[in-house]
Amino acid sequence: MAVLRADRAIPDSVVRHRLDGETALRYLLIGLFGLFLYLFVLYPMSKVLWRSLLNNDGAFIGAANYVRYFSTPAIAASITNSLYVSVVAMVVTVCLAFVYAYALTRTLTPWRGPFRVVAMLPIFAPSLVQGIAFVYIFGNNGIWTRLTDINIGVYGAKGIIMAEVFYCFPHAMLILIAALTATDARLYDAAAALGASKLKTFFTVTLPGVKYGLMSACFVVFTLVITDFGAPKVIGGKFSVMATEIYNQVIGQQNFTMGATVSVVLLVPALVAFVVDRLIQRRQYALVSSSAKPLEPRKNPLAEWGLFAYCALIAGSIAAIYLVILVVSLVDRWPYRLAFTLKHYAFDTVGGYSPLLNSVYVSALTAVVGTAVAFLGAYLVEKWRTRARAPLYALSLLPVSIPGMVLGLAYIFTFNVSGSILNRLYGTLAILVISNLIHYFTVPFLTATTSLKQMDAEFENVGASMGVPFYKTFWRVTVPIALPSIISISMYLFLNAMVTLSAVVFLVAPGTELAAVAVLLMDDAGDTAQAAAMSVLIIAVGLIVRFVYWLLMRGVTRRTQAWTQTAPDQAAVMGTGSLK
Amino acid sequence: MTATAPRPPAVELDGIAKKFGEVVALKSVSLSVGEGEFVCFLGPSGCGKTTLIRIIAGLELQNAGVVRMGGPDVSALPPSERNYGIVFQSYALFPNLTVARNVAYGLETRRTPRAEIERRVDELLDLVHLRPHKGRYPAQLSGGEQQRVALARALAPSPSLLLLDEPLSALDARVRQSLRLEIKALQRRLGITTIMVTHDQEEALTMADRIVVMNHGVVEQIGSPFEIYTEPSSLFVARFVGHMNFIPATACERPGWVRVGSVELRHRPGPTPPPGSRLTLAIRPEEILIGPAARDGENRIVTRVCAMQFLGAFTRLGLALPGESRPTLECDVAVNALAEVGVREGAELPLVLKPEALRLFPDGG
């Protein structure tokens, strides 16, 4: 029978299981994931930091580079310039996107579906496309300038802000739509029952409810703008921001140490925005309970027509930008000879279609490899609470706060080292895939983590209790359940890899040119019509891929309908509203 | 259980201790489970019962102590080598696999021929009466059906030990009642050693051969449901299992007697506390005698009816002791007896607290 022993000190160590093949495999995978993150995130970043403390001959000079940076007005201006355009673009974008998202989610404004689709267009274009379009509209020879004879002086801060607002609009809109959708109709019922006016309800219920969403949108837009390189490059003129400053130092003056210095400084605002955003998101959780009732918008013709006009204006402007790009790419010489031609699609200056094909190839590889790494990584981190968990998690979140220019520069310092084994990667398509994968790693990693968290924590334990190895349960249960997330992760990676410029601009080599870089080079060379043509093709590829994913997702949903559907008796209670 | 069991116990725990950081979850737990026995770990949430079953399963690593299964020490074996089946509170059914494939999950990796697997799956689904549902997905089943699929899946590879972690707590009361009987009958039929974790004392009382009552990482009492109910070894067990009246009392000079307010009562024979010490008397509501049985006898007191709570088959009376205005005693009276005795709110009610039913605990447990 039971013997209760006297209390004695409990040792801190645990009785370990003997190491079997499965556990060894687990440790091996975790080790490989750690090595991957070290080699492609931590080590390159430490190289940038270190390089910023050296002079161009490689001697240690402490903070001298920073002193020079802050005391040279021409370079130091890039900091205030960057902050200025980022803050203004952030405020404008979030305000515009809030009203737009409000119209789409909280009102019965007509054409909500088409408005939403049109507003997503900028996601499919590199950021410099907006810049090129504004040059064509408001530039010295732009259509607006010629028609009205008013030159608004688009080259500089004004142009950058305009281009960034359009570039960031869908990102802010998506966050705000999510925030505005997650609400509880009972709060509005309560406010109405208490006799609150519409205005009062807006300020006491609506705004507090989307507070975190608004803040999140602000941080995302701020980070996107301050790290963006494309738009300031094509429309910024002499107005220098930090991202273009890095480019000028590295490509223009071959001054790598100053490039590293500006990079480290650029890391600061991006890191701060990231950390604050994480803290806010952590608090956002319990805002809407699972018993919340969705809000059904009521009819309000006056507001609806006002908002319809607003949405039509914004959607129309967005559509106009891409229409301009399309038209410019298809006419002989804008705005002098408007005859239809396909000659700009020959891309004679950048070697024909190879940049586009490279881009598709690199994007596809990024999607496949990146999805596998992000999902496996999230699985390793989420399922096995080893001591390596916290550092691996932190290293997986870090990339989102690394500006693309900084990552690209870091990879030059890491992989362009003669004599090093890492040098083998330099100038290959592989390094482009890896840099894209790391640059866009965090969002897929978090998406995968979320979908893994939603799964029953005991799946592997059930398998283990029956002697089924974890990798079988992973393949037969975890992956099929997470398939929708896996598909959306790969789409995210593909689309981003297709349009990114900042991380890869330092890494492309002869033979590995990419489409977005080609746009930049052709624009630089004055072949703006060809740049527009290439942009059209990038957008077209993005849209086609998006459509394919939509078909894929529909197929998956149809196939998994049987097992995601709720039991008949439960469905009757909950109503059809909860059926996916 | 005899001290000289011919076979080693199916599960034997020796000095199991576990802490999470600085929080001690289990302090040296030792117990054994016999072959074919159904043992319940019963206790409030946070008492360590789930941690204990997870240590047996090898899903949690103990800081000290040894787990033996059928004799040999299995402490160093990973879960996959311990030969048990487990049903979790959430069931953890694989949502993307049909009922049949869920049940077959543990068989498919054991190089069993396909026809053999199908036969075994059908056999198990018959056992839990779910064969008509074999092609459905878990989401298309009710909670109780899902629970039975989880049970069939755990039993499919013919494990020598079945672990049930709060298997019924996610179900509604009616389904829970019928599944209790079904699981118990199944366990009897298969003769499989079973350990179940529950916080529901009724569940433990109806299902278990033996109950292990736990509190704060310590085993409070081990015994048959009858022993646990009738002879709780501590105030905690008395409080946790069943309904119990607690009356503050003081030990009298006369051994075997205690003073409650103005009356002296004789309690059941046992250790004699020093006179004047504070004690707690415990008696179950159904052990209080009223009506004809309370006309005379030892420990007869006259109480006042303060409250009457209608509970269907019986009515629970709130009774104030002599000289008190608030109820300290609760007494359950069947509906017809209520009319016979003529209980009214505010009226006096004589009753007898049989000395054998008056258990004595030192104050503070």
Image: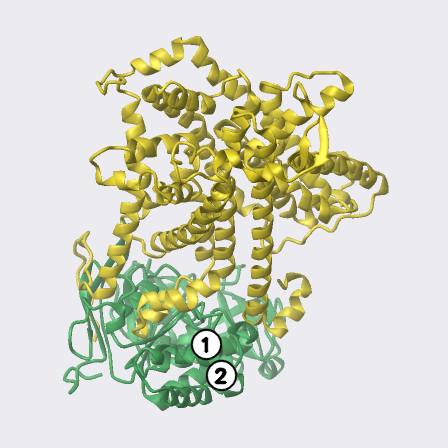
Chain colours: A yellow, B green
In this view, the residue in front, A488 or A409, is A409
Q: Residue at x 22, y 18 (%)?
A: A60
Quadrant where the N terminus of chain A sits is bottom left
In this view, the residue in front, A471 or A394, is A471
SS at mark 1 in the image: strand
x and y percent of residue A427 in the render? 34, 38
Instruction: Tell me the kind of residue under disc 1.
Output: Val
Dividing the picture into quadrants, the one containing residue A311 is top right
Q: Would residue A453 appear left or right of A377 to someone viewing this image?
A: right
Instruction: Tell me the kind of residue under disc 2.
Output: Ala
Please tell me how crowded label 1 is: few (under 14), some (14-19), or many (20+) other residues with Cα within 10 Å.
many
Quadrant where the C terminus of chain A sits is bottom right
Residue B186 seen in the current view: yes
Q: Would residue B332 appear left or right of A266 to someone viewing this image?
A: right
x and y percent of residue B190 in the render? 34, 89
In this view, the residue in front, A250 or A292, is A250
In this view, the residue in front, A366 or A26, is A366
x and y percent of residue B138 in the render? 51, 74
Residue on which disc 2 sits:
B293
Judged from this view, the residue extending furthest toward the right is A301
SS at mark 2 in the image: helix
Check the image and report above or below for A183 versus A577.
Answer: above
Q: Are marks 2 and 1 in contact (CB under 8 Å)?
A: yes
Residue on which disc 1 sits:
B352
Chain on which label 2 sits? B
Check the image and report above or below for A90 versus A177.
Answer: above
